[in-house]
């Protein structure tokens, strides 16, 4: 909050409801009151397809920590403390598999020559020919399942292994157990009493120090008797190297691709004694012990991979990285490492505060019971606040500068292989992961996504040329950390044919600029990515005899037939061309290209409304009103795009509403998250809130992870993006305050959200009416604000805060 005035208003508004109270414990905490068992210990399954996670304890009750690249799940078992470990670049597959670089990269088919034939078949209405030619020629050569090829070249994100800490304590003797993740500090604490001793454990993942820290202590001396063991990924080989009594290094490599990885552990005891034992460390009679974990792989991001070099993604030896990190910490104690972690984490997390007038709080209940109560319809606005802040926590924990972006499970995985390879799914999932980032004041979490997009450009140019004879670059349904952009080998085109994955990713590049207004980024990095994606989109289109540009062939991802103009594809192209045009104007570059983009955009096949009043999904009016499919791809223009709006295109917005009514309010977790955002864009706060409740009640696990099922993190991110879309929108060229405020949130406040143009927004409302808003201008420039039917325009100065009140049905600047 930027001024004293805003603080006074908050105090005045919430004192009657008990909001002036302060608590010594964490305001936002996910916690359980029972220890977990060890039933999931080392349940290594090589290929479990798309089924449920075999380790339900891990999936439903573990508490995740992470620093963007190194993560862990805390189970909190007593006799043997089990901790699963992940390093985000530990991947099977890639050019260093047994058959080498050419085997990995030569996965694109030379299919561009079939495009004219397919398009003629559309004109001849020979849809069987369209389907056969597309299925046989627009797939790729690499399999998506390990059982379908050897060696497996696409690969999968895989586990680093598990850590076991044997304590010698008996669970039957314990009481007062609590395991809690504090979102305020990003620290997991476990505490319990055994006989007459109170034991405490703490776990955190430090971004500044690139380590995970674990501390064991108790209220009595000489009670720490621990044997630490490491169970590595079983699809690897390696050695254990003792580096003095207080350090141990596990140096290993994956069998599939020889990727090297390392886990190094330093033991810092107080009192007692310690020694290396086989595959671990033993601590006896210590008062306290701290374990510092450092993990790394030999992966090196490469924007210009050499297609002939099997080691083009291989860099520094991982044991050099782990050793350097631990050496930097020499002399630091637990509190020093914790303070570094807190200073870094809280500088991000504390930017946004949300208060939904939660008169009744049930924070005294364990989270699993609290969720069960919420599922039964118990009003718990504080729980909704917790869910929102948990999403922000997960993004900070799974996406930091210098790492890969958040994947299908963010950072956390407990097996050799997992659902959909735990990959980068480009047909909504990775995009949804980043929907909340800018508005939630976490723009620092976005550079990993930008870097990932840059890794796709060079391989994506080969894919664009091979399949479409097109300029620029694109990607397909799934990517890995090794620049994979081709479609996969399946002939099921309903999911495997997705050439617009690249342009969709490119729209995020523009969004990053639109929020930050970082002109240097746009000049040096962003524009080229957007421009080349727009050029691909233009070349991909079919200019029909009537002069209209259409996407042929195309599909609506994971749904329906091969079409000559799927609405989703046109919507993405409309968005990326609009972004490219704006960027070109701003930078005053590429006049010729811009004129081409404008001409194509003006002649792109328009949206169509069907016989039910619905926004048509395909070029023909074949939509089924009883179809409740999870994907709502054809509403891309409503959200995340901006070509459909109740304000600028009310008829199309009404048609989009019909689609949402047909599809229903229940689906997989991430799908409910998407629909939540779309209802908010339709300015229907109560219906958006219904989807938010459905997401929590039907798509959320006891540890508040989203479930598809199984666990997918995109629903968490989509859900909190929807919360912010209800409270703030800025995609139509103005800052829209409380555009879809639900009746359930009639009184509240939020501070620290960010709108496009780099304006930080804080608001207070009461009885569903705006009381005051503050706009902090980070970059200066013109600012336009809308609330209800009143619009206010003013010029802002960088670094200045503007207070806005709503009085007499009119927005006005408040004079200080």
Image (spheres, grey):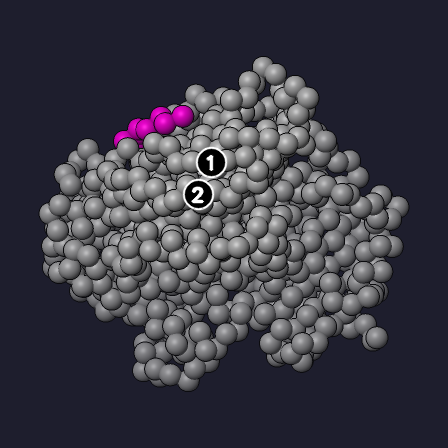
Percent from the top left, x then y, of residue 588? 42, 84
Q: Is residue 46 magenta?
A: yes
Identify the residue at image location x=83%, y=65%.
Answer: 5
Q: Nearer the viewer, residue 68 or 803?
A: 68
Image quadrant assignment for residue 39 = top left
The reply to whether discs 1 and 2 touch (Cβ–Cβ < 8 Å) is yes
Q: Give the residue at mark 1.
A: 274
- Look at the picture and state if 498 lies above or below 574: above
Question: Can residue 559 be seen?
Answer: no
Residue corresponding to mark 2: 246
User: Does the magenta stretch mainly form a helix, a strand or a loop?
Assistant: loop
Occupied quadrant, residue 451: bottom left
Residue 97: horizontal and vertical position, in percent?
A: 17, 47
Q: Label 2: how many residues lie within 10 Å, few (<14), some (14-19) or many (20+)?
A: some
Residues shaded magenta: 41-50
Q: Is residue 794 magenta?
A: no
Q: Closer to the camera, 424 or 807?
A: 424
Report the residue at 66% width, 25% height from top. 197
């Amino acid at each position: 909050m930027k001024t004293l005035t805003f603080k006074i208003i908050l105090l005045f508004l919430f004192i009657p409801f008990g909001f002036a109270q302060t608590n010594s414990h964490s305001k936002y905490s996910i916690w359980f009151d029972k220890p977990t068992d060890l039933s999931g210990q080392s349940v290594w399954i090589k290929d479990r397809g798309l089924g449920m996670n075999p380790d339900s304890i891990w999936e439903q009750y573990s508490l995740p920590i992470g620093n963007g690249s190194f993560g862990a799940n805390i189970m909190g078992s007593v006799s043997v403390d089990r901790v699963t470990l992940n390093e985000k670049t530990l991947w099977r597959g890639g050019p260093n598999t047994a058959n080498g670089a050419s085997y990995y990269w030569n996965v694109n088919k030379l299919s561009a020559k079939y495009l004219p034939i397919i398009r003629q078949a559309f004109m001849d209405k020979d849809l069987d020919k369209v389907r056969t030619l597309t299925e046989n020629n627009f797939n790729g050569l690499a399999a998506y399942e390990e059982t379908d090829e050897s060696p497996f070249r696409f690969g999968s994100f895989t586990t680093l292994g598990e850590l076991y800490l044997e304590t010698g304590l008996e669970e039957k003797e314990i009481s007062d157990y609590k395991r809690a993740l504090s979102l305020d500090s990003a620290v997991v604490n476990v505490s319990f009493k055994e006989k007459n001793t109170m034991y405490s454990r703490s776990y955190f993942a430090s971004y500044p120090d690139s380590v995970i820290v674990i501390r064991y202590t108790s209220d009595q001396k000489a009670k720490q008797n621990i044997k630490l063991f490491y169970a590595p990924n079983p699809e690897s080989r390696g050695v254990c190297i003792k580096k003095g009594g207080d350090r141990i290094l596990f140096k290993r490599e994956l069998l599939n691709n020889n990727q090297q990885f390392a886990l190094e552990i330093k033991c810092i005891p107080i009192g007692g004694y310690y020694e290396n034992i086989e595959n671990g460390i033993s601590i006896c009679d210590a008062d306290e012990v701290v374990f510092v974990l450092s993990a790394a792989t030999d992966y090196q991001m490469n924007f210009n991979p050499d297609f002939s070099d099997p080691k083009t993604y291989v860099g520094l030896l991982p044991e050099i990285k782990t050793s350097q990190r631990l050496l930097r910490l020499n002399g630091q104690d637990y509190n020093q490492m914790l303070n570094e972690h807190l200073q870094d984490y809280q500088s991000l997390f504390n930017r946004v505060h949300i208060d939904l007038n939660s008169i009744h709080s049930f924070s005294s209940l364990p989270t699993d019971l609290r969720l069960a109560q919420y599922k039964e319809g118990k009003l718990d606005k504080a729980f909704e606040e917790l869910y929102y802040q948990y999403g922000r926590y997960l993004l900070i924990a799974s996406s930091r500068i210098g790492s890969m972006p958040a994947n299908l499970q963010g950072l956390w995985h407990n097996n050799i292989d997992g659902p959909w390879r735990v990959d980068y799914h480009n047909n909504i999932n990775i995009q949804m992961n980043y929907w909340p980032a800018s508005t939630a004041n976490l723009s620092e979490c976005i550079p990993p996504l930008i870097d990932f997009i840059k890794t796709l450009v060079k391989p994506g140019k080969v894919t664009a040329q091979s399949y479409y004879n097109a300029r620029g670059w694109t990607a397909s349904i799934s990517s890995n950390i090794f620049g994979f952009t081709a479609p996969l080998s399946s002939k099921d085109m309903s999911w495997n044919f997705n050439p617009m994955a690249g342009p969709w990713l490119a729209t995020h590049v523009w969004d990053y600029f639109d929020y930050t207004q970082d002109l240097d980024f746009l000049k040096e990095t962003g524009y080229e990515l957007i421009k080349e994606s727009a050029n691909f989109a233009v070349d991909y289109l079919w200019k029909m005899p009537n002069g209209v540009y259409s996407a042929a062939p195309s599909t609506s991802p994971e749904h329906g037939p091969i079409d000559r103009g799927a609405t989703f594809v046109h919507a993405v192209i409309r968005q990326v061309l609009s972004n490219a045009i704006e960027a070109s104007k701003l930078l005053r570059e590429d006049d010729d290209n811009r004129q081409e983009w404008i001409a194509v955009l003006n002649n792109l096949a328009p949206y169509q409304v069907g016989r039910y009043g619905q926004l048509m999904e395909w070029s023909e009016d074949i939509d089924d009103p009883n179809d409740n499919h999870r994907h709502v791809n054809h509403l891309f223009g409503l959200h995340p795009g901006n070509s459909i709006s109740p304000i600028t295109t009310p008829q199309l917005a009404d048609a989009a509403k019909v689609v949402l009514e047909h599809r229903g309010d229940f689906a997989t977790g991430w799908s409910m998250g998407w629909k939540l955002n779309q209802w908010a864009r339709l300015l229907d706060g109560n219906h958006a809130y219904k989807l938010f409740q459905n997401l929590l009640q039907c798509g959320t696990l006891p540890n508040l992870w989203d479930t598809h099922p199984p666990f997918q993190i995109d629903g968490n991110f989509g859900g909190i993006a929807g919360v912010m879309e209800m409270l703030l929108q800025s995609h139509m060229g103005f800052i829209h305050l409380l555009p879809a405020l639900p009746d359930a949130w009639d009184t509240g406040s939020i501070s620290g959200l960010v709108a496009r143009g780099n304006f930080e927004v804080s608001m207070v409302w009461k009885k569903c009416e705006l009381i005051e808003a503050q706009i902090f201008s980070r970059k200066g420039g013109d600012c336009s604000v809308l609330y209800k039917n009143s619009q206010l325009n003013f010029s802002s100065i960088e670094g200045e805060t503007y207070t806005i009140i709503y009085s007499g049905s009119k927005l006005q600047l408040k004079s200080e």
